[in-house]
Image (cartoon, grey):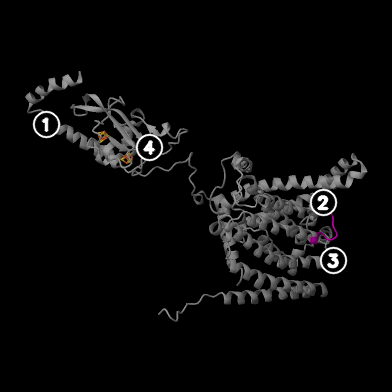
Amino acid sequence: MLGEGILKGLAETARNFFGSFVSKERLTTVQFPEERLPQPEAARNFPFLVYDGDDSQAGLRCVACQICEKECPPKCIFIQKSSDKKPDYIGKQQFYPAVFNIDVSVCMSCQICVEVCPFDAIEMDNAFELSTTDRFRGLLWSREQLAKPNSYFHNIHPATAAEVDERLAEAKARAEAKAKPTVAASTTSQPDSQTTTS
Amino acid sequence: MTETMDQIFVLLKHRILAHSPVSVQPIFSAALSAIAILVVFATLFALTTILERKGLGRFQNRYGPNRVGPFGLLQPLADGLKSLTKEDIVPHSADGVVHMLAPIVLVVAAFLGYAVLPLGRNMTAINLDAGLLYFFAASSVVELAIFMAGWSSRNKYSLLGAMRAIAQMISYEVPLILSTITAVMAAGSLSTGAIVESQTGYSGIWPHWFVFTPWGFAGFVLFMIAGIAESNRSPFDLPEGESEIIAGYFVEYSGFKFALFFLGEYIGMFAICGLAITLFLGGWAAPFSFLTWAPSYFWFFAKLLVLIAMLIWVRATLPRLRMDQLMNFAWKFMLPMALINLFAASTWHFTPPGAIRWIVGTILIAVPYLLLGRGLMQSNKLEKRTYRFAD
Ligand code: SF4
Ligand code: SF4
């Protein structure tokens, strides 16, 4: 009959209307700033620099090898190597980045910098509320802004962070094992490194 | 007490008028009514936009706007401020004068109809003897405004939208006016006031509204369908079909002019609803005889809000029609049904009151409806296509 479908449709929408007042499950909208869904673990946005320990600048894992700078497709990383060295997590003397900038307005979140970093020093963040009132300076992040503790990394990507930690611990153990039998070698290298740090 | 409450606005107007010289009283009286109508219906427009958005949200299992103010109730204010502060863009090759005039003409034309709507007992701004005729004459200017907007923008989409609007509005004006004639026949007058007066009686507690007769009900339904089409609302919003022609005839309008189009559209919709109330739903009459103590304007606005809610409900339910469906519906269903309804109404008047009148009246409408519906459905059946040459 003509008009039957219209009545059926009207009944359906009326059910929706009253149902939305009665049952909360119908309202699937997440009221964003107040309510948040947990982000999926693979969520990624822009890179950040991981540091160990308490000092966000001294503890940076980055050794300023500049591989990420070269590999970054849109060339949004800018690094200036330090002239001096400091010990890394194994205790080996390394350079560190005097300047490490990422222009996140250019970054395309490809994660290539993370993949190429041999020191697991750079990782992907999942923070997304990054609006600023200054679209030039405000989105050019310096070393200070990029540094985040390892615990934060564990927080946002637990599985990857655990894997990274394991790998780093393994490397450290290997380095120590290599260092032990050749004590003489390490002692000879000692004064060398001392001269560079001083 | 109830008498003063009922007439409070009329008395107030007389009180104000008493202070002005006799020579300017007629024009002053009209101005007072006009201001009242402008204020009341503009407020109703603001209220309706937020209620509609919230209601649509609930129909679709969403919350609707709930950010501005408590429960989002200040949203109309925010929208108004936004549209006021937006840049007013006139396309380079547009016809500037017509482009600017179109929204103004639309709003003025939409408001003109209210002059003859009885908003309460003795509350008709101008009680014309041919009020209904005036209403349709005034509301047909809306078509002109829409075509002005579409044509002057010099945009293909707006021209298409305007052409659709003209085709739709002229097609639906025929059943719209034909369906009102039943009420005119029953009341024996074109005056909106007299049409309401003829519905104010009660049998027992039941009112004598025209909608409670077979022809009145059919007329009301036909009138509302044609009215929705006339005010370009979903499911008849082809002239502004967002998914096909962006925004139709007002695609080139921004800022306050856009807001004026929005206002005009809603004001037109309220006017159509108000006329439906006047013609079929007893105007300002109370729905039951024991409720007559409430002021008459209260009943008018209560009915208006119910009709608006109905329209929102329909909008939330039905998808937009296709152009050929729209035209088929107007000429193959609405027009014959309106004519049959006219016949049923006249039969009703010439049969003596009683059960037989009801049976005859119902049959006269239901049988053609069923036959017409079946016929239309059959012709619409999709068949498997056979291709003669492709195989
Ligand atoms: S995520 Fe990609 S684009 Fe962004 S800094 Fe790393 S390499 Fe460059
Ligand atoms: S982040 Fe990694 S790849 Fe980039 S400079 Fe530092 S250590 Fe090298």
**Residue B188's disc number:** 3
**Location of mark 2 (residue):** B125
Q: Quadrant of the C terminus of chain A?
A: top left
Among numbered discs 2 and 3, the one appearing first in the sequence: 2
* Callout 2 amino acid: Ala
Q: Nearer the viewer, mark 4 or mark 3?
A: 4
Q: Are marks 1 and 3 on the same chain?
A: no
Q: Is residue B127 magenta?
A: yes
Q: Where is mark 4, residue-wise? A: A104
Residue A133 is tagged as none
Q: Which residues are magenta?
A: B122-133
Against A11, residue A142 (above or below) is above
**Residue B286's spot in the image, x, y percent?**
78, 55
Q: Report helix, strand or loop for mark 1.
A: helix
Q: Are marks 2 and 3 on the same chain?
A: yes
Q: Is mark 4 within 8 Å of ligand 1?
A: yes
**Quadrant of the picture in which ligand 1 is shown:** top left
- Do marks 1 and 2 share a chain? no
- Mark 1 belongs to which amino acid? Ala
Question: Which comes sooner in the sequence, label 1 or label 4?
Answer: 4
Residue B379, picture quadrant: bottom right
Dominant secondary structure of the residues highlighted in magenta in the image: loop
Please state if A104 lies on the left or on the right of B120 as rendered: left
Could you tell me how far apart the alpha carbons at marks 4 and 2 are, in whole angstroms?
Answer: 64 Å
In the displayed orientation, state which residue is furthest to the right. Answer: B22
Confirm or deny contact between disc 1 and disc 4 (CB under 8 A): no
Residue that carries the numbered disc 1 in the rendered image? A177
